Amino acid sequence: MNQTLDEYAEAAIQRLLTEHPSLGEQGITLTRREHCLMLSGEVESPQRRAEIERLVNEALPDVDVRCDIGITRANPPTEHEELA
Amino acid sequence: MIRVAAVGDVHLDADVLGRYRPALEQLPGCADVLLLAGDLTRHGTVAEATCVATEFGNLAVPVIAVLGNHDHHADQPQDVTAVLEDAGITVLEGSGTVLTIDGTRLGVAGAKGFGGGFAGRCASDFGEPEMKAFVRTTCRIADRLGETLRSLDCDVLVALTHYAPIPETLAGEPLEIYPFLGSYLLGQAIDSAPTALAVHGHAHAGSERGTTPGGVRVRNVAHPVIKQAYSVFHLTGAERPTLTATGSAR
């Protein structure tokens, strides 16, 4: 594991995801694994996922960043809930 | 019976335009109204609000929205609201509206809400000015929400917020951030009226279902939680308001 991947780096990335003008993402979970940093959660478009990956890799060039971010489905519902 | 569709946290921008539209075109077949539970944009800019207006405007059912924290980020919530209202979307903040659907009056009271946390683990109106301002913001919003809920003259009453009124629908989020995700004061406001359903967003990693201490059903409709374009709830008039009221509040 790269030595730069500590708690402070994690906090900095969490803030970057929210505060960077091109992101504004508050729903991404960071998990520091033994040899990598995992990004998980969901975003609204593949472009946003790509931008997250790009900026995190740019901020942590020596860290193995793995992206497991999904795109939230936007299909119509197939059922409803009865609330009598 | 009234059919309520709801979704929050759609975070629209140009890259998402058109994604929801196929599902939205089906709304008249499955819902009488669409509620938008805040965080409609990414940064609260007019350009993003225009995307929301394009995607959620001119639908065949009425659309009622509250703003979320993202919609405030650019410090122009009035401009965002104006863009949405120009597209026919009703935007609520400490206010309400009543729709008559097949003879049944649906009342919707809406407010963004704010944080502070939940019973036994909440912030207090004490200490530094910043802390007092934080708590007083939530108190003011919750008071207004409660007043609006109690004032609506309707058959079925729904509360629409962005922040959560109960901790149960936050399950899945880190416990440490609960005070930033909602407040028991919103739940108390909801319980002060004969509310049939409370809908909120904000907690992307939260859970779908819960109830207030008073037994009101609460649904977290944040898009990443429901994982579909919107959820649909069928409400009967069983929870008929018993309070005397005079028209819609503002």
Image (cartoon, rainbow, N blue to C red):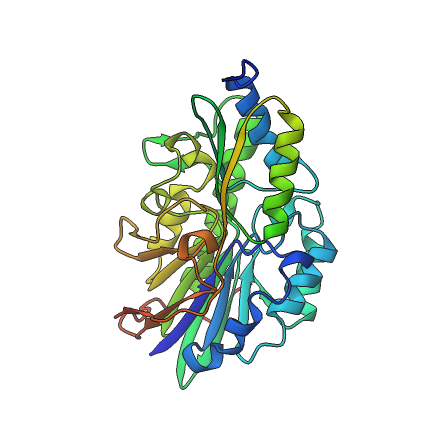
* Vertical position of residue B207 compared to residue B109: above or below: above
Q: Position of residue B53 (x, y in %)?
A: 66, 66
Tell me: B89 left or right of B208: right
Extreme residue toward the bottom, this view: B102
Residue at (50% x, 59% y) in the render: B110
Seen in the image, is B133 located left or right of residue B245? right
Residue B247 seen by the camera: no
Q: Image height check: is B157 above or below B219? A: below
In terms of image quadrants, where is residue B89?
Answer: bottom right
Q: Residue at x 52, y 62 (%)?
A: B36
A11 versus B118 height, above or below = above
Residue at image location 51% in from the left, 45% down from the top? B140
Q: Nearer the viewer, residue B184 or A83?
A: A83
Q: Nearer the viewer, residue A66 or B100?
A: A66
Q: Is residue A26 left or right of residue A51?
A: left
Q: Position of residue B44 (x, y in %)?
A: 67, 50
Q: Residue at x 56, y 50 (%)?
A: B68
Q: Position of residue B180 (x, y in %)?
A: 47, 36
Quarter of the image with the N terminus of chain B is bottom left
The picture quadrant where one finds residue B244 is bottom left
Total labels: the figure holds 0
Quick one: quadrant of the C terminus of chain B?
Answer: bottom right
